Amino acid sequence: MINNQFKHISVLLNESVNGLNIKSNGIYIDATFGMGGHSKLILSKLNNRGRLIAIDRDPNSIITSKKIINDNRFLIKNSSFSQLQKFIISEKLVGKINGILLDLGISSSQLDNSERGFSFMHDGPLDMRMNQTIGQSATEWLMKAKESDIAWVLKTYGEERFAKKIAKAIIYHNHCSLKKPITRTKQLAKLIEQVIPFKEKNKHPATRSFQAIRIYINNELEEISKLLKDSLNILAPHGRLSIISFHSLENKLINHFIQTHSRWSEFLIRLPLTDMELKTIHKPILKILGKIKPTVKEITENPRARSAIVHFAEIL
Ligand SMILES: C[S@@+](CC[C@H](N)C(=O)[O-])C[C@H]1O[C@@H](n2cnc3c(N)ncnc32)[C@H](O)[C@@H]1O
């Protein structure tokens, strides 16, 4: 279902696009089209020789794009951004891309649509796939996963202290009780609420578990790692990365990537080098351009922006 009743306010819109330092005749990539807010702003800064390639793994975003953008400088693909490099190779654009924008996670239109199963605030099928036509839903995974795997996901991707307790309760509910298996968002949220012994201020007890399951179901961290690595081949000299992240796991991954590629191999500080080290030696290929957080005004107008950070880097 696609319904424009679900609105999305683009986060750090001007900051993230300004950070790309757009050349009006350049070629840019919006790897997370969503509802197209960032794409529209990028297009407004290009002349008739500029191009924008957009990607989204959610087929609904592609339908939205057809409704809101009719521009022959614009092309959109329904794909995961981990597959971007293949497309860029096929288009013979390797080393020619002037900037890549990533606005991670899900859009409000996905979160607020109960049929997508991302939110514990709305009751709906526990799905959580960004592309509902491929892969397993959260319900399917919870039905066949081992207790230790569920606990690992909740701990690793949700930093959930009560991961083991929650996993045990899910397995008991699905396989050992006479209750109906967990297939609805509210069912899971309620179960977690009953298991967690106390409430954090201003945070629903299911927040961390829902984040963890969503990250796992959509393979989110592997997707980001692959795109970051590929960006080093895809980008032109002085090409820029502008990446909006929303939680600490994304931040760690992005910071580590930018820092690793912006300095000499660490072992150079202790010469002489072994043959192995000589083979893997690398000099800086990225320049760190800093980070920006939303203003208080933006957070007041759009609470979804509260944990956002945009990270910038440039190919040397
Ligand atoms: C936060 S929204 C982007 C919002 C957009 N910048 C706007 O202004 O409307 C993130 C979008 O990225 C998509 N997405 C997330 N991970 C993706 C991936 N690995 N590959 C492709 N699209 C992805 C989601 O489906 C979602 O539509």
Image: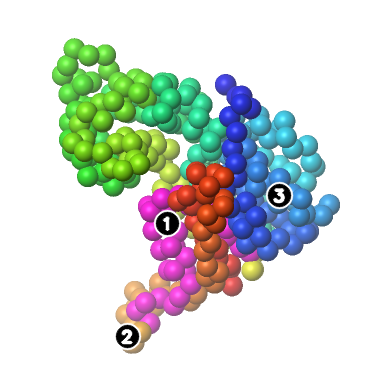
- Disc 3/disc 2 C-alpha distance (Å): 47 Å
The picture places residue 183, in percent across and down from the top left corner, at: 34, 20
In front: label 3 or label 2: 3
Part of the protein shown in magenta: 239-268
Q: Regarding mark 1 in the picture, which secondary structure is present there?
A: helix
Residue at 55% x, 65% y is 313
| Image quarter (top left, top right, bottom left or bottom right) of the N terminus | top right
The picture places residue 217, in percent across and down from the top left corner, at: 39, 35
Query: Residue 251 shows which numbered tag?
Result: 1
254 relative position to 54: left or right: left
Q: Which residue is mark 3?
A: 41
Q: Quadrant location of ligand 1? A: top right
The picture places residue 2, in percent across and down from the top left corner, at: 60, 24
> Which residue is nearer to you in this view: 112 or 26?
112
> Which residue is nearer to you in this view: 53 or 41?
41
Residue 149, picture quadrant: top left
* Tags 2 and 1 touching, CB below 8 Å: no
Q: Is residue 116 above or below residue 78?
A: above
Inspect the image, locate mark 1, and give the three-letter code of the amino acid beneath it: Asn
87 relative position to 70: left or right: left
- Disc 2/disc 1 C-alpha distance (Å): 30 Å
Residue at 55% x, 56% y is 295
Q: Tag 1: Cα neighbours inside 10 Å, few (<14), some, or many (≥20)?
A: some
**Is residue 246 located in the magenta-colored stretch of the structure?**
yes
Inspect the image, locate mark 2, and give the three-letter code of the amino acid beneath it: Arg
The picture places residue 298, in percent across and down from the top left corner, at: 56, 50
Q: Which residue is mark 2?
A: 270
Q: Regarding mark 3 in the picture, which secondary structure is present there?
A: helix
Inspect the image, locate mark 3, and give the three-letter code of the amino acid beneath it: Leu
Instruction: Tell me which numbered mark, 3 or 1, is placed earlier along the sequence.
Output: 3
Say if disc 2 is inside 8 Å of ligand 1.
Answer: no
Residue at 25% x, 35% y is 150
